Amino acid sequence: MDTSYLKQFYKKTRNEKIQALQQAGVISAADAQMLKEGLSLPDEAAENMIENQLAKYELPYGVAPGFLIDGKEYVVPMAMEEPSVIAAASAAAKVIGAAGGFHTTISKRRMIGQIALKDLPDLAAAEKMVLANKAAILQLANRAHPSIVKRGGGAKALEVRLLPADATIDSPDFLVVQLQIETLEAMGANIVNTMMEGIRDELEELTGGTVLMGILSNYAIECLATATCRIPAHLLKRGQFSGADVRDRLIEAFQFAYVDPYRAVTHNKGIMNGIDAVVLASGNDWRAIEAGAHAYAAKDGQYRSLATWSKADNGDLLGELTLPLPVGTVGGSIGIHPAAQFTKRLLNYVSAQELEAVIVSVGLAQNFSALKALVTEGIQKGHMGLHARSLAINVGAQGKEIDQVTQQLKKAKNMNTATAEQLLAAIRQSAQH
């Protein structure tokens, strides 16, 4: 990749951006032409993806260049509607890249499947029976999906959880049998659910209970991704704030989110701005990722910040983000949607682990940019510039009018629709004379 073509990327026109990506070696000539024509989903594919399909709802698809992750450079695709997210991710990537980039650790990629049993004559005896037959249950689960086993995956571990009756909601005792299943390059929902269905009869016979359900869990704590970064304080200087001031204020902003769930929710929403955008661009299930991430944020009983920031002994800023990331490189809409297929070629990732590394790094970058803005000039400065552009478009500005209205809105006393309409009318009247 020749990154020289990507300098001042945000200042280029759409066609210039596409050309720059091709010149940099990020995309092929064929993909450049595809981008110019659009990454729209074919009508037939859309009709068969969901029931009662009426139309296609599009989101902007953009890229954040400059991500250095585990020594490899990436141009990261993001699909989303919020104006400032890509700009923030790109800005963070530039600073963190200058400090050596992101470093990631990916845990074993295992999904969790659950069988919930009720009406058990003896809860303790049922638990012992299941554990005594662990090997046979795992073997039975693997027989339900032999193709994944042939490729080296399959059910690898079993645990049992006892959930006693809760008088508050009048729930029964539950015995939960959980399998850890390696789904390889797939996110694996169908694989897991098939295996759970394959063991339910055996579990009823062993325990004397009744199976309530068998289903995967999106709380994928056996599929964790971690990104870290280390930033020297001098790279953090912002306006009137010294690098050390920004570092210390940013750490305090994390501490605020750690102890206060009201702040933590918004804090983590900012992290998910970046994560969801890449997950969506890759064709993966962003709802599953959201659910698992927020559950993980409350793993100790209180909802807290997903990312942590601290000071190293030498004064550097240390950042770390860990969350469950059960994404896949095959299955679902990944092989159907042209945008998901293009994302795969653009990122040029070779495995689900590598895709996880990119996604978690973007989440940490997003958090860095948000906190840095909040503790220095405030979050609104960047937001309002992009908000002004949206207002200009909403009132009908076209071509050069968009930039003209945007610039004047930034200087106006009130940034709202009425002001934008007045400015556009004045610009058009002036152009007629």
Image (cartoon, grey):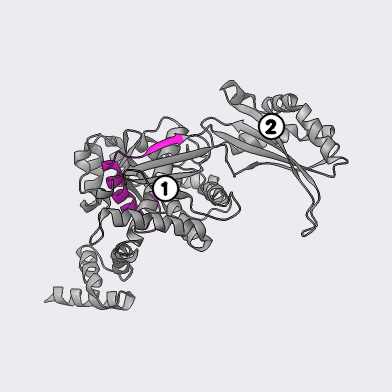
For the point 31% across and 71% down, the residue is: 395
Between the C-alphas of marks 1 and 2, the distance is 32 Å
At which x and y percent is residue 137? 73, 28
Q: Amino acid at mark 2?
A: Leu
Q: Quadrant of the N terminus?
A: top left
Looking at the rendered structure, the secondary structure element under dot 2 is: strand
Decide: is 252 above or below 185: below
Q: Which residue is mark 1?
A: 363
Apparent side of residue 326 relative to residue 343 in the rendered image (left or right): right
Q: Which quarter of the picture shows residue 2?
A: top left
Q: Nearer the viewer, residue 239 or 327?
A: 239
The magenta segment is 79-105
Q: Is residue 269 visible?
A: no
Q: Amino acid at mark 1?
A: Gly
Residue 158 is tagged as: 2
Asked if residue 70 lies in the magenta stretch, the reply is no
In the depicted structure, whether residue 383 falls above or below residue 199? below
- Residue 237: x and y in percent read 25, 54
Mark with earlier residue (1, 2)? 2
